[in-house]
Image (cartoon, rainbow, N blue to C red):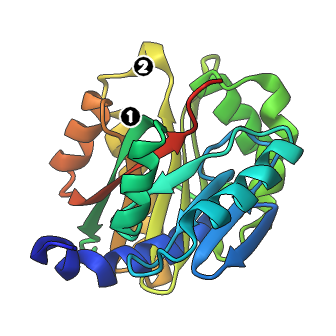
């Protein structure tokens, strides 16, 4: 059974989940009932490689459906991964618990209203059009493996909503921060936000998030969303200062090692 707090959140969770899938598209996406199986073998992101139950009342044939999806993952050389959200059927959660599926990396989804700006304000920071340059900067700033370049480029190029690729850099210093804003109707998602480790604590993260939100507001977005690891206290503190509050959490489940 779902508690009243969870029931109240479900419409928001459903909308943010749908927007999130469009903002970070997988190479393949197929439904088994209301379970969405997303796979992108070339990219290591769990969000791009996960089983996503999207109806808390759709718990029929859980073991069979889980095994069918897991087989697809194993055939692709991937670890079967369930993304557990408030939309996951309680019976499936109980089944995963009973089977010993490990709980991994809890993530907090946060939202905030995007404040209006005076019409006389200029954009300030213009987003890039060069996806390759942005990806190279992301790899340099966040320390992503260089071999992820092609896969990350492919994911960004597959986004159908309007994107703002933001890059802060300094002459002689190279890139210092990056952020990807995806504007979809009245919502804007912030993804791939990163500040170079040696420049953290200087307000650069606040500034690049602010630039991204300013752009999204001018494009028509009125509310922003983002996802951040639950143990990333500096990022959580920054987003709370910027007015973001927790909407819900999700985590990943993988089978016990044999």
Considering only vertical position in the picture, is 12 above or below 251?
below
From the top left corner, tell me how far across and down residue 20 is, in percent.
53, 67
Q: Between disc 1 and disc 2, whose residue precedes?
A: 2
Q: Is residue 238 left or right of residue 143?
A: left
Element type where label 2 sits in the image: helix
Residue 183 appears in view: yes
From the top left corner, tell me how far across and down residue 118 is, in percent.
27, 77
Of 106 and 3, the residue lying toward us: 3
Considering only vertical position in the picture, is 67 above or below 238?
below
Do the residues bearing badges 1 and 2 touch, measured as CB atoms within 8 Å? yes
Q: Is residue 32 left or right of residue 99?
A: right
Which residue is at a point 29% across and 71% down the rendered structure image?
114
Q: Is residue 203 left or right of residue 14?
A: left
Rendering quarter of residue 24: bottom right
Of 132 and 249, the residue lying toward us: 249
Residue 123 appears in view: no
Considering only vertical position in the picture, is 212 above or below 228?
below
Q: Label 2 neighbourhood size at 10 Å, few (<14), some (14-19), many (20+)?
A: few
Considering only vertical position in the picture, is 52 above or below 81?
below
Q: Which residue is mark 2?
A: 199
Rendering quarter of residue 164: bottom right
Q: Which residue is mark 1?
A: 204
Which residue is at a point 46% across and 58% down the rendered structure image?
212
Which residue is at a point 77% across and 42% down the rendered structure image?
43
């Amino acid at each position: 059974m779902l508690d009243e707090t969870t029931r109240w959140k479900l419409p928001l969770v459903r909308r943010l989940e749908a927007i999130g899938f469009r903002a970070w598209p997988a190479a393949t996406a197929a439904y088994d009932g209301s379970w969405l199986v997303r796979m992108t073998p070339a990219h290591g992101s769990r969000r791009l490689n996960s089983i996503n139950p999207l109806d808390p009342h759709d718990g029929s044939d859980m073991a069979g459906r889980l095994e069918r999806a897991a087989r697809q993952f194993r055939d692709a050389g991937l670890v079967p991964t369930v993304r557990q959200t408030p939309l996951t059927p309680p019976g499936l959660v109980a089944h995963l618990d009973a089977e010993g599926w490990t709980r991994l990396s809890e993530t907090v989804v946060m939202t905030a209203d995007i404040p209006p700006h005076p019409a006389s304000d200029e954009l300030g920071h213009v987003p890039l059009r060069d996806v390759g340059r942005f990806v190279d900067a992301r790899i340099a700033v966040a320390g992503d493996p260089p071999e992820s370049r092609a896969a990350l480029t492919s994911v960004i190029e597959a986004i159908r909503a309007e994107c703002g690729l933001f890059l802060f850099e300094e002459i002689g210093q190279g890139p210092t921060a990056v952020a990807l804003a995806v504007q979809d109707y009245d919502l804007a998602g912030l993804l791939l936000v990163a500040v170079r480790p040696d420049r953290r604590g200087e307000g650069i993260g606040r500034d690049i998030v602010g630039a991204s939100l300013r752009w999204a507001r001018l494009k028509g977005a009125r509310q922003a969303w983002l996802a951040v690891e639950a143990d990333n206290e500096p990022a959580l503190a920054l987003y709370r200062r910027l007015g973001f509050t927790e909407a819900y959490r999700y985590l990943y489940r993988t089978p016990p090692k044999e």
